Amino acid sequence: MAPKESTKDSLQRASNPIPDSFFSTLITANHILHKNSIVDAYGHISARNPRDHSTFFLSASVAPALVSTRADILEYRVLDGSAVDASTDRKSYLERFIHSEMYKAYQDVQSVVHAHSEAVLPFSITSVPLRPVFHMGGVLGTQAPVFDIALHYTGSDRQDLLVPNERLGSALAASMNPGTVVSRTKNLIQNIYSRPAEHAPPWPSHPVVLMRGHGFTAVGGTIEEAVYRAVYTVTNAKVQLQACLLQGGYNVGLVGEQMQGIKIDGGKGRAPDTKAEGVKYLSERECKEAWEANKTQASRPWGLWVREVEASGLYVNEYLTSPEEDEEQEAEE
């Protein structure tokens, strides 16, 4: 059973309230992720409590686009993923343990995004690693490890690829800081047997992890950073997929031309003018320094994304409703 909040803790909360801007930003983050097709009816973003790092905030189990009020945001304990307000009748996300275990493992993580992007999914079920292919892809780190939940099931687990408890959430969090790795290829961080969470550093060595047949999870030092990382992880996946298809098609055509040349020359063959090549990825240093440069500019797309969701007409954020709009709504009622 989750510990009951003490009178001292209750008084401390009352005397040091969380600013409205925090909840407004978290609501807007839900809308931005939906507007950019990172999440649909599924997927979620959380943020650690800025006043008490032992708890975090995550919306109730509703579509991200429909999160609109403070009442839609629930508070959970990092310790075990339990709701701080046990009396709430709002339904919780089954996979809130993805969030609680990330906060438990890495003290510098302040926000977590989980999504099922179709652009990212192919990299979770093939031997092709998701690696940065352009400067904005530096958000990934050198590449994204792949968490295979099947390695962590026990006989009592329901094998639906979801993360519904602390044990599986802990295994996912540990996979962002892989120790011993068994790889199918030299480039793929796959099938991870990880360091215990208690030995994890304050920040994971890989800020994005793919989840086999499920999606991905990304972390940030702020809400804005977590959103930024999620958006450009998906963008990188789209660019990389197109590059792989283009390069693969070119290589196949090149081989065909060479084979045709051999046939025409009566089997003598001829030296090809070009050779088959692979996609050019960012180097480790390029990944690091590209992210360092772009991190300082993260406020630029955030400002644009905020205006886009405000102008769309779909999203509602109670903290951004003007007094005039309130008066108009009351008059209509």
Image: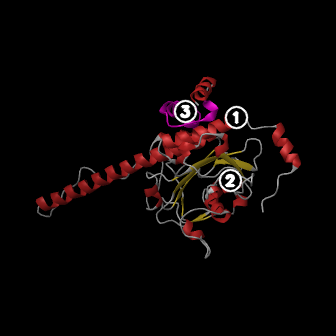
Asked whether, in this view, residue 143 is left or right of residue 178, the answer is left
Q: Where does the N terminus fall, quadrant-wise? A: bottom right
The residue carrying mark 3 is: 306
Q: Are marks 1 and 3 in contact (CB under 8 Å)?
A: no
On whether residue 308 falls in the magenta region, the answer is yes
Range of residues picked out in magenta: 292-321
Q: CA distance from mark 2 to mark 3?
A: 30 Å
Residue drawn where x is 63% and y is 50% of the image: 60
Residue drawn where x is 60% and y is 35% of the image: 317
Q: Nearer the viewer, residue 242 or 318?
A: 318
Comes first in the chain, label 1 or label 2: 1
Asked whether, in this view, residue 328 is left or right of residue 116, the answer is right
Image coords of residue 173 (percent x, y) = 63, 58
Q: Residue 89, labelled with which disc?
A: 2
Q: Is residue 285 above or below residue 125?
A: above
Image coords of residue 311 (percent x, y) = 49, 30
Q: Residue 20, labelled with which disc?
A: 1
Q: Residues within 10 Å of mark 1 (few under 14, many from 20)?
A: few
Image coords of residue 119 (percent x, y) = 43, 51
Q: Where does the C terminus fall, quadrant-wise? A: top right
Q: Amino acid at mark 3?
A: Val
Residue drawn where x is 20% and y is 55% of the image: 257
Image coords of residue 152 (percent x, y) = 60, 69
Comes first in the chain, label 1 or label 3: 1
Scheme of colours in the image: secondary structure
